[in-house]
Amino acid sequence: MSIRLAIEAFKQLENSDFRILQAVERGMITHQYVEIRIIAKYSGFDEEYTLKRLKRLNSLGLVQRIKRPYIGYILTSRGYDCLAFNALIKRQTLKAITATPLGEGKESEVYMGLTPGERVVAVKIHRVGRTSFRHTKKVRVYVGDKRHLSWLYQSRLAAKQEYEALRILYRHKVAVPEPIDWNRHVVVTGFVEGIELFKLPELTEPLEILKKIFEEVKKAYHASIIHGDLSEYNIMVTPDEKIVIFDWPQWISASHPSAYYYLKRDLTNVVEFFRRKYLLKIDTDRFVEEFLNSIGKLG
């Protein structure tokens, strides 16, 4: 999903439009579909003016009009994008973002952005889609038992969770992107140049890279964080063969009851990848167990 249409719509918005969008967002906390009277109340505009602006926002694809069981409105992902971009621009975090993604996953997209100081940054947009909502609500630790949980709000929780992990990890000098800011479902980090491991970059010493990854996992563990979904898809190798680990929304604490299971699964996934793709002749179980023993085995 490209954000090109969101960017084009964003350029046409006025302050009153953002107030309307924020009112719809607020109404969605307690209503499945937000009636015009509620949107008008939260925005501070009269109902006639509110309806006029809603029709325009609907034509731009930022809200959706629902006719049953009553007439109401909800934010679209495009409208949520615009609210997040507006907040980050006002906070002087961003001034521009590319319309073409650098990378796309099942539940996120990453774009290149620019700060007012001309720094190149990575802009990650979480998309915990409606189609996977029921499943992810069951399995994701960060969802918990929140009620009135919309798919937009779940994306926001994923972004918040990831930003929290990055702040802790970066402070403990773990090899992760530098956390800069976040708003709603968007996380802004330092830009890292490199190649994802699944693209099979040419490695001088694959075993040494594997050991580097394990060392970063150990440092994260000592910061009480376990990735929870580590694989070749969220490990990057830089041109000078350093590694960077990204995608942390599913992290769990090292004190979590299932910590041992997730940590061992993370490590096993990585070792098995190196065995298959880089033909390392190592015993996975033994390699993982020796590492777990070196940090103090859990469970």
Image (cartoon, rainbow, N blue to C red):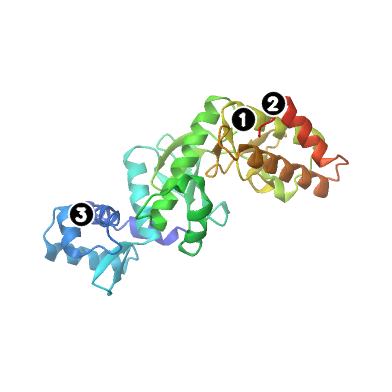
**Residue 160: quadrant of the picture:** top left
Residue in the picture at 70% in, 34% down: 213
Q: Secondary structure at mark 2?
A: helix
Residue in the picture at 85% in, 42% down: 280
Residue 112 % position (x, y): 51, 46
Q: Nearer the viewer, mark 1 or mark 3?
A: 1
- Circle 2/circle 1 CB separation < 8 Å: yes
Residue 295 badge: 2
Please say whether residue 5 is visible from this viewpoint.
yes
- Circle 3/circle 2 CB separation < 8 Å: no
Residue tagged 1: 221
Residue 288 % position (x, y): 76, 36
Pick whichever, 175 or 143, lies toward us.
Answer: 143
Residue 238 % position (x, y): 68, 37
Q: CA distance from mark 2 to mark 1?
A: 8 Å
Residue in the picture at 82% in, 45% down: 275
Please say whether residue 204 is visible from this viewpoint.
no
Task: Indicate left or right for 90 with 279 as reference.
Answer: left
Closer to the N terminus: mark 1 or mark 3?
A: 3
- Circle 1/circle 3 CB separation < 8 Å: no
> Type of residue at label 1?
Tyr
Q: Secondary structure at mark 3?
A: helix
Residue tagged 3: 16
> Type of residue at label 2?
Ile
Quadrant (top left/top right/bottom left/bottom right) for the C terminus: top right
Residue 5 % position (x, y): 41, 62
Q: Nearer the viewer, mark 3 or mark 2?
A: 2
Pick whichever, 278 or 131, lies toward us.
Answer: 131
Q: In the picture shown, does residue 121 fall above or below 111?
A: above
